[in-house]
Image (spheres, rainbow, N blue to C red):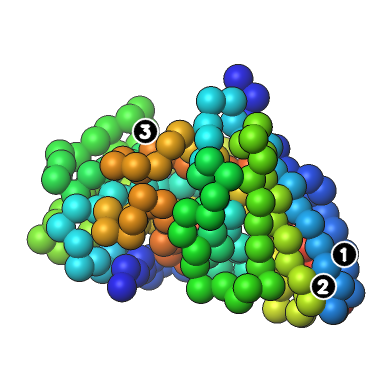
């Protein structure tokens, strides 16, 4: 069984640029959630995708957007990067949402540095 | 609004000591779910346990045990006979049923556990 994978591992961008992060979900999972983890903090929920549609969003501005593809992989896009966007971005996959919160399995993350 | 507090920022113990990580949560829901995750230096969060609000039975898994007390809104995690490999950041998280079907996780700030040989 293949786990959650993310790419790239590390990324350095300049303020104002745009970035795309990628995530492949674990086999059998059709739900993907994205979290931002600043240094020394717990992960914060950005949004979740289920069946290619956004299914809930945290307190993040619209310049954070995402996609989910038919194979359940996902992208996180961030426009107009700011210094505060520097963080570890974690992707988590799980079985379908609905009436029960199946455990979320996390990828290794993408470390984004904005200079 | 839901909130998770892990008051212990860092804990340092010597191998074979028992250690308890505290977690206090706030929620208005009667149905909710509590989780513990481990984050080793590699960065990947590892799922340890999920607990439903309607099941207060404590759980033991090997050297790990969890004490869920609704009366004090706490979900504490104990490692018995700690080992160096237990060194990591441990996160407690909460998910509410009323949050819709996305069951987003609200995490605490984590506790850094260092087990010294």
Residue B41 is situated, as x and y percent measured from the top left of the image, at 66, 49
Spatial CA span between label 3 and label 2? 41 Å
**Chain of the residue under label 1:** A
Quadrant that contains the C terminus of chain A: bottom right
Q: Are marks 3 and 2 in contact (CB under 8 Å)?
A: no
- Residue for point 81% across, 62% down: A19
Residue A99 is situated, as x and y percent measured from the top left of the image, at 29, 42
Asked whether residue B33 appears in the rendered view, the answer is yes
Residue furthest to the left in view is B71
Pointer 2: residues within 10 angstroms few (<14), some, or many (20+)? some
Q: Are marks 3 and 1 in contact (CB under 8 Å)?
A: no
For residue B15, which numbered disc appears in the image?
Answer: none
Residue B40 is situated, as x and y percent measured from the top left of the image, at 60, 46
Q: Circle 1 is placed at which residue position?
A: A12
- Residue for point 70% across, 78% down: A84
Asked whether residue B15 appears in the rendered view, the answer is no
Marks 3, 2: nearer the viewer: 2
Spatial CA span between label 3 and label 1? 40 Å
Secondary element under disc 2, as helix, strand or loop, is strand
- Looking at the picture, does residue A98 appear above or below residue A95? below
For residue B63, which numbered disc appears in the image?
Answer: 3
Q: Nearer the viewer, residue B5 or A68?
A: A68
Q: Circle 2 is placed at which residue position?
A: A114
Label located before the other in sequence (1 or 2): 1
Q: Nearer the viewer, residue A96 or B66?
A: A96
Q: Are marks 1 and 2 in contact (CB under 8 Å)?
A: yes
Secondary element under disc 3, as helix, strand or loop, is loop
């Amino acid at each position: 069984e293949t786990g959650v994978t993310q790419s790239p591992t590390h990324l350095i961008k300049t303020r104002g640029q745009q970035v795309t992060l990628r995530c492949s979900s674990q086999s059998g999972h059709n739900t993907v959630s994205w979290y931002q983890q600043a240094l020394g903090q717990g992960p914060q929920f950005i949004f979740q995708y289920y069946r290619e549609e956004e299914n809930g969003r945290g307190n993040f501005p619209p310049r954070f957007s995402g996609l989910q593809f038919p194979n359940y992989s996902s992208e996180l896009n961030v426009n107009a990067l700011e210094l505060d966007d520097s963080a570890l971005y974690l992707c988590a996959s799980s079985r379908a949402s609905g009436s029960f919160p199946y455990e979320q399995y996390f990828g290794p993350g993408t470390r984004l540095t904005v200079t | 609004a839901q909130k998770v507090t892990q008051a212990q920022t860092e804990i340092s113990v010597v191998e074979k000591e028992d250690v308890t990580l505290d977690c206090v949560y706030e929620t208005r829901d009667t149905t909710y779910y509590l989780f513990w995750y481990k984050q080793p230096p590699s960065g990947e969060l590892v799922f340890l346990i999920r607990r439903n609000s309607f099941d207060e039975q404590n759980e033991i898994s090997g050297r790990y045990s969890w004490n869920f007390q609704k009366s004090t809104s706490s979900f504490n995690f104990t490692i018995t006979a700690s080992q160096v490999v237990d060194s990591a950041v441990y996160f407690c998280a909460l998910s509410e049923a009323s949050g819709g079907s996305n069951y987003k996780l609200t995490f605490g700030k984590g506790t850094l556990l260092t087990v010294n040989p």
